[in-house]
Image (cartoon, rainbow, N blue to C red):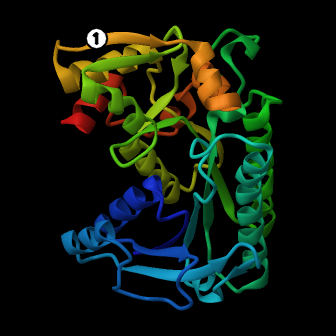
Amino acid sequence: MPTVLITGGTGTVGKRLTQLLIEKGYDVNILSRSHSKPIHGINKDREDTIALENNAHGKLAYYKWDLANQYIDPAAIGSADFIVHLAGAGVADKRWTEARKKEIANSRTQSSALIVSALKENPNHVKAVISASAIGWYGPDGSNTTAKKFVETDLHCHDFLGETCRVWEASIEPVTQLNKRLVILRTGIVLSNEGGALVEFKKPLLFKTAAILGNGKQIISWIHIDDLCNQYIYAIENQAMNGVYNAVAPIPVTNAILTKALARKVCGSFFITINIPAFMLKILLGEMSIEILKSTTVSSNKIETAGFHFKFPDINKAVDELVG
């Protein structure tokens, strides 16, 4: 089976993708800041160990990279058949100071530049690069003059996330000049038990409280983590895929619908609903609150037309699986 090199492999999406690839028999190499040579069969954390113990077909290895010094172990590039590029500082991990916003953008563009230069400078047989982006590319629904779901050909927004996505995608685009197939997945809100939005949505439910953000009418274009990871695998395995695809579920929902669906699954009928006022979110989160309150309705039609089938097309199926 082919070898997939992953940047950002220790994040929420990277860990699950690694597990699914190994289950399918792929060899997976992960770029890490803490290893100076390949370490085959040795795992950094328990989740990786479980992935290998459950399936003996694929192998897992770590190779060193150093973003500050623009270094990747040449053996990592030389052994790869495909590259999945997930690396980037967490958008919602910290308050958006000017320094943090610069870090968010630079972590994406500099890591892309490193991949491009490594592919130029090292002999390799990489067939394709599958890169993350985000639906932050699009603005709020009101900026969509067609009054329809955003599609891949729509122009980027000129706010912070829109500009970040623009430079992010532009920074990885030069791999096409090296005769590498490039697929970019503009990812929606990822629902996972291991991190991200769902974990935050579930916290108030410990107190039987469904916390709706603002008026709750803002549209969330979301995706179950397994559907997202399977889209990366689908992009690896289907040579016809090329260019940009929206990685969102077919049926977006409002914040209120998502919150209540989760509350019903966790609490049954015994919960109360409260609205967190927009002004309070602005005080707590600063500029980031704009994204929390923004309505963005994004189309999944292109990737469905490419033949991808969702396991979790609607929010109830996703919540049922995630909450169990």
Q: Nearer the viewer, residue 251 or 44?
A: 44
Instruction: Assign the C terminus to one quadrant of the image.
Output: top left
> Relative to residue 124, is residue 260 drawn left or right?
left
Q: Which image quarter is the N terminus in?
A: bottom left
Q: Which residue in the structure is indicated by mark 1?
A: 272
Q: Position of residue 131 (x, y in %)?
A: 62, 55
Tell which of 250 and 193 is nearer to you: 193
Dot 1: within a 10 Å radius of its alpha carbon, few (fewer than 14), some, or many (20 or more) residues? some
Is residue 306 in view from this perspective? Answer: yes
Q: Mark 1: which amino acid? A: Ile
Q: Residue at x 76, y 79 (%)?
A: 69
Q: Residue 64 location, x and y as percent?
A: 58, 82
Which quadrant holds residue 92?
Answer: top right
Going 39% across and 29% down the picture, which residue do you hit?
201
**SS class, disc 1:** strand
- Give x and y (percent) for residue 13: 45, 53
Q: Quadrant of residue 112?
A: bottom right
Q: Is residue 317 visible?
A: no
Q: Nearer the viewer, residue 59 or 49?
A: 49
